[in-house]
Amino acid sequence: MTFQEQILQGIPSELPAKKAYPKDANRAPKRKDILTVEEKQLAIRNALRYFPAEWHAELAPEFAQELLDFGRIYMYRFKPEYKMYARPIEEYPAKSQQAAGIMLMMQNNLDPAVAQHPEELITYGGNGAVFQNWAQYLLCMKYLATMTDEQTLHMYSGHPMGLFPSSKGAPRVIVTNGMVIPNYSKPDHWEKFNALGVSQYGQMTAGSFMYIGPQGIVHGTTITVMNAFRKILKKGETPSGKIFLTAGLGGMSGAQPKAGNISGCITIAAEVNPKAATKRHEQGWVDVLVDNMDDLVKRVKQAQANSEVVSIAYIGNVVDVWERFDQEEIFIHVGSDQTSLHIPWTGGYYPVDVSFEESNRLIREEPEVFKEKVQESLRRHAAAVNNHTAKGTYFFDYGNAFLLEASRAGADIMAENGIDFRYKSYVQDILGPMCFDYGFGPFRWVCTSGKPEDLDMTDEIAMNVLQEIMESSPEEIQLQMQDNITWIKDAKKNKMVVGSQARILYADAEGRAKIAEAFNNAIAEGKIGPVVLGRDHHDVSGTDSPFRETSNIYDGSKFTADMAIHNVIGDSFRGATWVSIHNGGGVGWGEVINGGFGMLLDGTPEADARLKNMLFYDVNNGIARRSWARNEEAMFAIKREMDRRPDLKVTLPNLVEDSLLKDLF
């Protein structure tokens, strides 16, 4: 059967042969054995409802074994034979071009070059799933291939509930992931509901079909590092020859040296795992590999003397680096940490003065000793950071739970009030006030033709649009504009593309709409093929996350999720091709509500109207909320937007003098 015929078939009419899992696959971790016997029977009953009764006797024991082996029923037998990648949009069988664009994005999320655990339909984060099982994938692709522009596919945590009559102006797909009742939103609830096959963890861009590989991580880290330096440097001063010290060279943290190079500083990333450090060096993501402290000190002093832009991977513990640099009087301008301290006892963070091999033995054989060593190391780590910040180092928490775990270890990491941490997170101090409050966030697009030359043209279009906007931009956002002009100029040179021909940059509502309009015009003129627009959920408006995206909301509302819900509803009737809303994300199940969208540009006047209407709301919904929280930068931004669009009317806060409140209670 051809690729198109297999898509149109959906679940096959004849039971396919059982498959063996590939030996070299990067397998998802085995999940908890959390179901009772009765619940396991229910899980099998739930799985079998996708298939005709005559198959049940053969499939039941197979699915039971999957549940036993993996803690989940993935239905691997039904994985299609064709290769999984984002094909050019015209290769998809579809009555609706919008639906074809969604099929392309789904396959990109499951491309082995992009996905972390593709056999289990998981894109990233160990649990960020596109579907729960392969039957859902097959059904969904058939629905998308046969739907019209007057139908909408509704998806419940990966399950395609079905096609419902709607209208041309409605989204083609509505996605929810993990939307459980709040009292049933603890981590073990996810384990149970996912094992039963009734809910899934969509992370952020995994379950909304908008992941574009590591490019987004590099760009976000670049923006963070650039703005971290901006907070401490004098006007006109550059980061060249200045130090950014951090730890971690893994899946997410591995972006740091490349981001440091783009930012123009000296980056030192300590990594205890020699294989991880060597891999990043071989990939060209880090320039220099050093395995002893004396060589590191010598190389760093040389880089400082020559005002170099260079990234250095140090195979060793970052605590040693902080302490030795203190002794050597090497000034660290910016410091952070991106080790996986959300899992501190299972290899997310390694203690100082214990070898990598011995640490792994302790994890397996003496976990309590390992925990003691980690907490002792965290106390030393925090003390060394404090020594440097006393000299003027700027340190920020990178959302990896470093401050949280250091506080639990008894480190000197608390502020004077005993409630807050001594140091702020990167969203509180950098991305929030310097980007999100002004409306700048991770806008992204995918060229559905699959042609690199189309991506080149979109890069040029975006750069020209940003340069034109910058000429009349207010001083408050000039640096944000310049950062992204620099990024897009160098994007091809930095070799960011993995999977689909995609790009990301930070832009505000004006920038996003004008770039998208220029794309749509180029499509209409036949210069490029259709383009899918989207964004990361880690953005101005899409995510309510009290310890990350909305951590700089100080009016007491950071634990509410109205913004994310309004975002997905508002985008849906303003022209999005698909919308998604999720429980859970990078900070954990039950800790965040986040939403996203996708929009296909096809060169038509209708697409032009949709992009102007939806992109404006998608950003300004978040700015309005941040303004109501009395965020100064957001108040500036929303007033500017009301001047730009007289039909926008937003409730503004009246500020209260502190002195009026002091003696009230």
Image: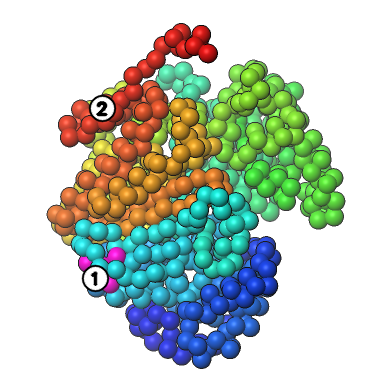
Q: In this image, 560 relative to 146: left or right?
A: right
Q: Residue furthest front?
A: 665
Residue at x 34% of width, y 23% of height: 653
Q: Which mark is residue 120?
A: none
Q: Is residue 548 magenta?
A: no
Q: Which residue is mark 1?
A: 148
Residue at x 77% of width, y 40% of height: 374
Please state which of the two labelled residues, at mark 1 or mark 2, is closer to the viewer: 1
* Number of callouts: 2
Q: Position of residue 120 (x, y in %)?
A: 55, 68
Q: Name the secondary structure under disc 2.
A: helix
Query: Is residue 5 shown above or below 442?
Result: below
Query: Is residue 446 shown above or below 11?
Result: above
Q: Position of residue 373 (x, y in %)?
A: 81, 40
- Rounded to the nearest angstrom, the CA distance separating label 1 from label 2 is 40 Å
Q: Which quadrant of the view contains residue 438?
A: top left
Q: Name the secondary structure under disc 1.
A: loop
User: Which quadrant is home to the N terminus?
Assistant: bottom left
Which residues are the magenta region?
147-152
Q: Position of residue 573 (x, y in %)?
A: 25, 52
Q: Which quadrant of the view contains residue 89?
A: bottom left
Q: Amino acid at mark 1?
A: Thr
Q: Residues within 10 Å of mark 1 (few under 14, many from 20)?
A: many
Residue at x 60% of width, y 57% of height: 189
Q: Which residue is mark 2?
A: 640
Q: Is residue 151 magenta?
A: yes
Q: Position of residue 420 (x, y in %)?
A: 61, 26
Dot 1 or dot 2: first in sequence order is 1
Cβ atoms under marks 1 and 2 closer than 8 Å: no
Q: Residues within 10 Å of mark 2 (few under 14, many from 20)?
A: few
